[in-house]
Image: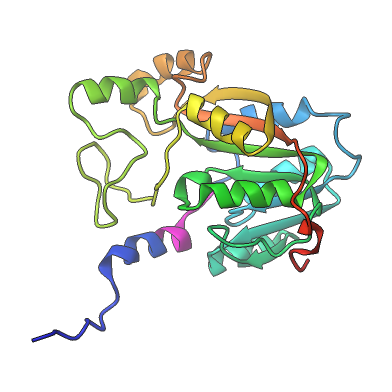
Amino acid sequence: MIEQPSTKPARKWSALRKFYETAADGDAGAFPRYELQLEQLRSLAGQLPPSPRFLDLGCASGAWSERVAATLGASSVVGVDLSTKALRGASERGIQAVFASVDGVVLPFRSGSFDVVMLDEVIEHLVDTDGIIEEIHRVLQPDGVLVLSTPNLAAWFNRIGLLVGLQPAFTEVAYSGVYGRPGDEVVGHLRLFTWRALREFLGAHDFAIVSVKGAPFHGLPRLAHPLDRLATRSPSVAADLLVVARPEGLRSPGATSRGTI
């Protein structure tokens, strides 16, 4: 006998949907990486147009987008997210809010539409990492920049944790809960990079790295903070990887016709 499929919502997706609808970006200054990223952006002064066009993929409520845009002196700000609640907040901040996925899709923008694209703590949530980087390359101006941050799989505390059999921080094996390590928040991380993997991945997709910084992790116990700050001096063992990169190489034939905005 063949059983009929259940009509109940799949429980494994509920935690992930809840995360995207309730995730907050605090006061756009709550995480240690923020000031380091702003330093990276300020170092680009004179290398970008006077009023760059800025795209934030995974903008949440737009608090961080707004702060980055102010630092860049952006003439226009577009934010993309899957959370309708977050996009309402972004729209209230004057951001052109676009409801769309960034995973395995063609972004709804014409080629060369932006001078700066930010992918902040997003790539680790995606299945098709190749697709999003190719799309960012397409929508960027040839002299534009990608601003990317993501957790470091090879962070110093993950290296220690593996020695005693702990599941690495930032990783999850199910949507139903956190298993094998401390913590209880499911955040939907699917792909985790080491610094070496991220560097090689970006290079393979025709991006040249302009700068990289390591950032500390706010979720560690207070006693670990001094060591965590020390580890930021070497991106290979830092908790978070902050990268600025520029597109290289030729765009694919016909790419200028893709997108709608």
Colouring convention used in this rendered image of the protein: rainbow
Residue at x-position 63% and y-position 53%: 57
Whether residue 122 can be seen here: no
- State the residue in front, 51 or 162: 162
Residue at x-position 78% and y-position 66%: 261
Residue at x-position 86% and y-position 30%: 47
* In the displayed structure image, the side of residue 197 where residue 37 appears, left or right: right
Whether residue 11 can be seen here: yes
- State the residue in front, 253 or 13: 253
In which quadrant of the rendered view does residue 256 lie? bottom right
Looking at the rendering, the stretch of residues picked out in magenta corresponds to: 19-25
Give the x, y percent position of residue 247.
Answer: 74, 38
- State the residue in front, 114 or 61: 114
Residue at x-position 58% and y-position 30%: 242
Up-down relation of residue 68 to residue 254 (above or below): above
Up-down relation of residue 100 to residue 144 (above or below): below
Give the x, y percent position of residue 120.
Answer: 58, 43
In which quadrant of the rendered view does residue 258 lie? bottom right
In which quadrant of the rendered view does residue 111 lie? bottom right
Give the x, y percent position of residue 165.
Answer: 18, 28
* In the displayed structure image, the side of residue 179 where residue 125 appears, left or right: right
Q: Residue furthest left?
A: 1
Q: Residue furthest right?
A: 50
* In the displayed structure image, the side of residue 258 where residue 80 appears, left or right: left
- 69 in magenta: no
Q: Which quarter of the figure is the N terminus placed in?
A: bottom left
Give the x, y percent position of residue 188.
Answer: 39, 52
* In the displayed structure image, the side of residue 157 where residue 256 appears, left or right: right
Report how many numbered discs are placed on residues in the image: 0
